[in-house]
Every structure is written in structure tokens, then in C-alpha cells.
């Protein structure tokens, strides 16, 4: 597993901690080890794949963070390296790669539908890294849902997933002339930082602004108000990916497996828009 993300954002990322735990649980049953490396960018990641395969250090790889223009599937095809892409949409151009994916578009649509039902017309999505396929799917879906309803006060802002950027973007959008009445954060850490930033500015959650976290975790229940969140079994996501990889190593065919759509769990941080 090679991860091309800022290393300082990983220690507090509950999704990856649970994903790796699920992966390791299945691999341990087969007495397989997980070789893990963090790199600067995708070209470095590709170089690691070439080196590991040439040196016979791995039997297969788990690929995360699919990009919109991603060179990795072509490279994996070229090398003949067994691989499972985690979080990618089905791709008929690479039938030799297995894919485990979640319906981010459906999840975003469900959140927008609920917020719209609560009267929210100005919604800001504080997103993760630009260029990631799941980030772009969420952004496209938010835009499409807004256009379908004739909403103009809706936007997405990309970040590095950190608490610092989550707080900074929150301050900026809430200080605007027409601040949003709802904020959707792409992870729990940014959501917590956002609530703190909103409170510092004098906004009450959810009376003045509703908050939804894309990832659910214990953190969402360790802050007041408790955060509404999209819940999914991230450990099972990891287990599924690891099972698909071991199936490839056993000679099985590549498959596309869809995990359940993340489910919105409403808690104390969402409520009716004040200006309805």
C-alpha cells in the first residue's frame, strides 16, 4: 500500500486508520504482511511500484485515492501487477484490475436532499484534495443537485483534509456577505475544526449554520453539538479490498465490488435553516 498524501494529515485520519485495520485483519488470516510507504506524489508512487515488482518484494498492491487523470492503472497493466483499486468507479478500460467502490454521488445527493428539505439554500462543501476521483464526484454531484433545484449559493472548496485548512475555509465563507447556512466537510477532523471556527465567529451550530461530516467516527460524538455524519463501515471496506486482492492472488478473475452507500446519521449539528 503506497500513499501519496501529506504525511502530517494521516495521523488523525480515521478513515485510513480503519481501512488499514480492515486490510490487515484479512491479510493476517493468510499470514501475509502489509508493506506500507508514504510518498510525495503519484510519480513517486509509480516508481515504488516499478521497484517493488522488479525486486519481487510484493505479490500485489492496494491502490487508493484514484485520480481523474490517473497514470497508475496503465502502469499496473503494463507490469502485470495484481491490484485492487479502492474507491474508484468501475473502469472497463482496465479489466485486469479489481475495483472496490462506494457511491459518493449517491451519498452527496442524499445529504443535499436532506439539507434542502430543512430549508437550506446556501450550502458550502469543504472538500478534500483536488484531483481525487471521489472529490470530483462529490463536487459534480453537489453542482448538479444545486442546478436541479435552481440554487445559486452553493459551492465546493478543496483543501488538504487538515484541521488547519478546514478552519481557515470555514472562517472565510462565514465572513462573506451572504454566509452559508449549511457546511459539508469531507472528513471528521475538518468538521470539528469548522465547528470551533464557527463558534469563535459567533455562529451557533445548528441555529445559524448546520454541519455535516462525511466521515463518522468517535470524534463526531466527542464534541458539542454531536455531529451529523455520513456513516460507513470503513474497516469492512478494507476487508473487502483485501479479500479481492487475495482472490486475485489465488488466480481468480478481476471483479468490481460495490460497498453500501454511506448513510446519513442525523445528530445535533443539523437543523432547519434560520432564514426560511
Image: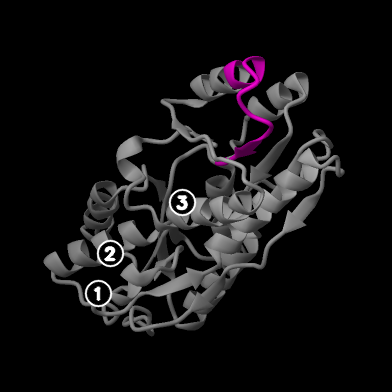
Q: Quadrant of residue 120?
A: bottom left
Cα–Cα span, label 3 and label 1: 21 Å
Residue at numbered disc 1: 223
Tell me if residue 59 is in the magenta stretch: yes
Residue 48 appears at what percent x and percent y?
Answer: 54, 21
Residue at numbered disc 3: 16
> Viewer-nearest of labels 3 and 1?
3
Verify CB contact (< 8 Å) between mark 1 and mark 2. Answer: yes
At 62% from the left edge and 17% from the top edge, which residue is drawn?
50
Residue 192: which disc? 2
Q: Quadrant of residue 59?
A: top right
Q: Nearer the viewer, residue 190 or 217?
A: 217
Tell me if residue 69 is in the magenta stretch: no
Q: Nearer the viewer, residue 68 or 144?
A: 68
- Other residues around mark 2 within 10 Å, as few (<14) / some (14–19) / many (≥20): many
Q: What residue range appears in magenta?
A: 51-65
Verify CB contact (< 8 Å) between mark 3 and mark 1. Answer: no
- Label whose residue precedes the other's in the sequence (3 or 1): 3
Q: Secondary structure at mark 2?
A: helix
Cα–Cα span, label 3 and label 2: 18 Å
At 52% from the left edge and 48% from the top edge, which residue is drawn?
135
Amino acid at each position: 500500500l503506497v500513499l501519496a498524501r501529506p504525511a502530517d494529515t494521516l495521523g488523525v485520519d480515521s478513515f485510513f486508520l480503519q481501512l488499514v485495520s480492515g486490510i490487515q485483519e484479512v491479510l493476517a488470516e493468510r499470514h501475509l504482511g502489509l508493506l506500507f510507504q508514504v510518498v510525495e506524489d503519484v510519480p513517486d508512487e509509480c516508481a515504488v511500484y516499478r521497484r517493488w515488482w522488479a525486486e519481487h518484494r510484493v505479490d500485489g498492491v492496494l491502490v487508493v485515492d484514484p485520480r481523474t487523470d490517473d497514470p497508475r492503472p496503465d502502469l499496473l497493466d503494463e507490469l502485470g501487477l495484481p491490484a485492487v483499486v479502492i474507491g474508484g468507479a468501475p473502469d472497463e478500460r482496465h479489466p485486469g484490475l479489481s475495483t472496490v467502490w462506494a457511491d459518493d454521488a449517491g451519498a452527496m445527493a442524499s445529504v443535499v436532499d436532506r439539507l434542502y428539505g430543512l430549508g437550506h439554500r446556501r450550502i458550502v462543501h469543504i472538500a478534500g484534495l483536488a484531483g481525487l476521483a471521489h472529490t470530483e464526484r462529490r463536487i459534480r454531484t453537489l453542482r448538479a443537485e444545486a442546478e436541479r433545484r435552481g440554487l445559486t449559493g452553493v459551492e465546493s472548496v478543496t483543501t488538504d483534509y487538515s484541521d488547519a485548512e478546514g478552519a481557515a475555509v470555514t472562517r472565510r465563507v462565514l465572513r462573506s456577505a451572504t454566509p452559508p447556512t449549511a457546511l459539508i466537510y469531507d472528513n471528521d477532523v475538518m468538521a470539528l475544526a469548522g465547528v470551533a471556527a464557527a463558534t469563535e465567529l459567533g455562529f451557533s451550530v445548528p441555529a445559524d449554520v448546520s454541519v455535516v461530516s462525511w466521515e463518522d467516527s468517535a470524534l463526531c460524538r466527542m464534541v458539542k453539538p454531536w455531529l451529523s455524519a455520513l456513516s460507513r463501515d470503513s474497516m469492512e471496506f478494507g476487508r473487502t479490498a483485501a479479500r479481492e486482492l487475495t482472490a486475485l492472488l489465488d488466480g481468480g478473475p478481476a471483479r468490481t465490488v460495490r460497498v453500501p452507500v454511506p448513510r446519513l446519521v442525523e445528530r445535533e449539528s443539523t437543523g432547519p435553516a434560520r432564514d426560511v
